[in-house]
Amino acid sequence: MLLRQLAAVAFVAVVTAPAGGVAAQERASVVIGVDGRTTAGAWTSVVAEVRDAPGARLRVDLDAGGLDRGTVPMRAQRVLPAAGGVQRASFDLPLPRWRSLSWRIEHEGRLLASGSLPTRERDDRPLHLVLGATSPPAPDPDDPEAEPGGDVALRAARVSVADLPERVAGWDGVAGLWIDGSTVAPEPARIVTAAVAGVRVHVRPDAPASYGPLLELVADGPLRIGAGAIVPWTEEVVVRPAEDDAARAWRTTTLAFVADRIDDAPWTHLPRSLLAGAAGGYLLLCWSLLRIGGPSGTAAAGVLVAAALIVAPSAAPERSTEEARATVTVARDGLGVRTELLRLAAQPPGERTLDGIWRADPPRPLSWEDGRTRIPMATGDRVRAFGTPELVEAPSASTDARLLDAEDRSEALAAFAGRPVPAGARLLQRGDDWWWLPFDGGTAVARAPTRTEGAR
């Protein structure tokens, strides 16, 4: 079924200048983003290659700070395979709005490659990728959803098949993909991954026979899958950047809405009745110490101290770190993109290590090392984190999940105040799992009501 979900994407202004996110030397190269182009605030692919340097180490350093929060250092490290020949490492990182970004590859104390991405190249506008020689149509200057006086030009880049991201997370900063059929046909699975991630893929219906699997997907018109769609690239295609931004906005808002509904991770205390009894006994011993003198008083004081040494540690939380989790899946036609949400609370200071790559919101100092995330936490610190988006098989409906009742649904829609909501979208909850089943009825037309005081 995976091969039967493909597409092509439409586009506008094409950039062909060399990308600042690529650094290369004779024995090593690093690419951050799609052909070196990144989108601030989105997940970004990182690809490193070395030749005849087994066990080389890649290090990426960035500062996500600002005037309001000072320096926020982050570091990613990855050890490449300890083997000869050409070795490759590919992974995804959450790229915040950074003030500085640099990287280096070292092997046995020697620098093989290094580079940086200038702040002037930071851009939070989503990318439109062009796969081919044909320029996509210009954006609609009369787009009713566009901001008054705003720039309607798309941020476009011409790429090759080899530049296309491999995983869902790598497509996070991409809004559109335009395929005219003039290049080698891309793998259908990679195009399906793009659509599931939320990309609108446009494919020329007159593409050559090698594009057969893709053309089959759009033979009967647009195919909506996951959070995006694969549609025919015809003369009637109208490009509306605001519509692409809206599709990304409601997905991001859904994550924030569910994250706010997760209760802060509670501390694990002893039962209240036990603590109340211990406190009562403590008071009785204090009274005895004051009323009884001499040897008896000394004995009572000893019992009092012993009781304090026992009760005080027992009254503290049993675990140093507590957590609460949930997942959000945006699904359509059997496939979806799932994101795990996590809220952490720490009692004593220390470092929490999580399996996988996580994004902290708001940005905070942390490090990613060989597929794990390390988060330093102060006493009483609380952290909200989002896991790497993943491609999953998902039902188009869930019989054991509940459709949020009227009150909950109005609260959910209130979280989308001022933003389009997919027509016919359903918000389901099953335990700690949340499901958005969007685009049952076409384009995003429903408007959310004004946010109320009770909405979170």
Image (tube, helix red, strand yellow):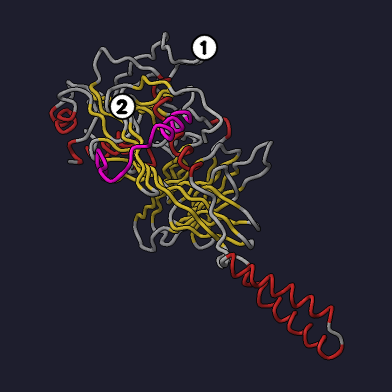
The CA distance from mark 1 to mark 2 is: 28 Å
Residue 316 rendering spot, x and y as whole percentages:
63, 67
Task: Name the outermost residue toward the top.
Answer: 142
Amino acid type, mark 2: Gly
Tell me if mark 2 has few (under 14), some (14-19) or many (20+) residues whose alpha carbon lies within 10 angstroms of its own: some
User: Left or right of 12: which side holds 395?
Assistant: left
Please report the bounds of the magenta region as a residue range: 393-415
Above or below, 196 relative to 30: above
Task: Name the outermost residue toward the right.
Answer: 294
* Magenta stretch holds residue 342: no
User: Left or right of 344: which side holds 294?
Assistant: right
Most foreground residue, 49 or 293: 293
Tell me if mark 1 has few (under 14), some (14-19) or many (20+) residues whose alpha carbon lies within 10 angstroms of its own: few
Amino acid type, mark 1: Pro
Q: Which residue is mark 1?
A: 148
Task: Identify the image quadrant of the N terminus.
Answer: top left
* Magenta stretch holds residue 396: yes
Residue at (45, 39) in percent of width and height: 255
Residue 67 rendering spot, x and y as whole percentages:
69, 36
Most foreground residue, 443 or 433: 433
Residue 116 rendering spot, x and y as whole percentages:
54, 41
Residue 376 found in image quarter: bottom right
* SS assignment at label 1: loop
Q: Which residue is mark 2?
A: 424
**Residue 267 badge:** none
